């Protein structure tokens, strides 16, 4: 066999190998059944939190922890940038996270029951997108 033919075969084999490796690395991980149950218990506990602002902070934290378990790194904002395509409505997730940031960085920030309900619902939908 000629050398150019062998080089061509080697390149094809390498291309197939790297394509398979890339697909495996980009395969979307999901939460295990046990992890999902743990987070669902936390979501259910949110209903018992009377403080509307704290409820949003806790919901945001649950999503942050779930993304961390799936291997996303950085702040929740950084995780959302990378994980964005996984969410059915990434703009809604960002809106909820921005409300969380407003609460966390503005002393005495007031959150209505409706704002809290919407934010928690949006964050919960994002969590469901991960399962």
Image: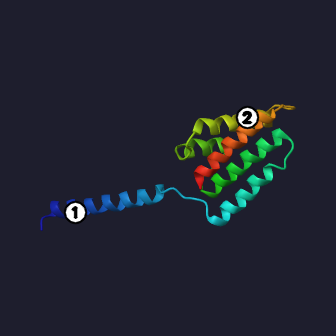
Mark 2 vs 1, N-terminal side: 1
- The residue that appears at 51% across and 56% down in the rendered structure is 28
- The residue that appears at 68% across and 49% down in the rendered structure is 63
In the rendered image, the vertical position of residue 26 relative to residue 106, given as above or below: below
In the rendered image, the vertical position of residue 6 relative to residue 84, given as above or below: below
Image position, residue 72 (x, y; %): 60, 52
Provide the residue designation for mark 1: 9
Tell me how far mark 2 sits from mark 1, CA to CA: 55 Å
**What number is the disc on residue 110?**
none
- The residue that appears at 69% across and 43% down in the rendered structure is 121
In the rendered image, the vertical position of residue 21 relative to residue 52, given as above or below: below
Image position, residue 117 (x, y; %): 75, 39
Q: Secondary structure at mark 1?
A: helix
Residue 25 vs residue 37, the one in the foreground: 37
**Within the image, what quadrant is residue 37 found in?**
bottom right
Q: Secondary structure at mark 2?
A: helix
Callouts 2 and 1 close, C-beta under 8 Å: no
Quadrant of the snapshot with the C terminus: bottom right
Image position, residue 56 (x, y; %): 77, 42
Residue 95 vs residue 76, the one in the foreground: 95
Colouring: rainbow
What is the tally of numbered marks visible in this picture? 2
Residue 84 vs residue 43, the one in the foreground: 43
Q: Nearer the viewer's eye, disc 2 or disc 1?
A: 2
Provide the residue designation for mark 2: 99
Image position, residue 49 (x, y; %): 84, 47
């Amino acid at each position: 066999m000629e050398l150019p033919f062998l080089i061509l075969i080697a390149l094809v084999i390498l291309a197939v190998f790297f394509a398979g490796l890339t697909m495996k690395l980009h395969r979307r991980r999901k939460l295990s059944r046990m992890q999902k149950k743990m987070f669902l218990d936390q979501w259910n506990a949110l209903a018992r939190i009377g403080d509307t602002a704290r409820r949003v902070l806790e919901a945001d934290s649950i999503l942050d922890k779930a993304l961390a378990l799936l291997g996303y790194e950085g702040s929740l904002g950084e995780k959302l940038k990378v994980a964005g395509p996984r969410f059915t409505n990434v703009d809604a997730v960002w809106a909820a996270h921005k409300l969380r940031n407003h609460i966390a960085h503005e002393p005495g920030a007031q959150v209505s029951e409706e704002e809290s309900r919407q934010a928690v619902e949006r964050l919960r939908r994002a969590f469901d997108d991960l399962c």
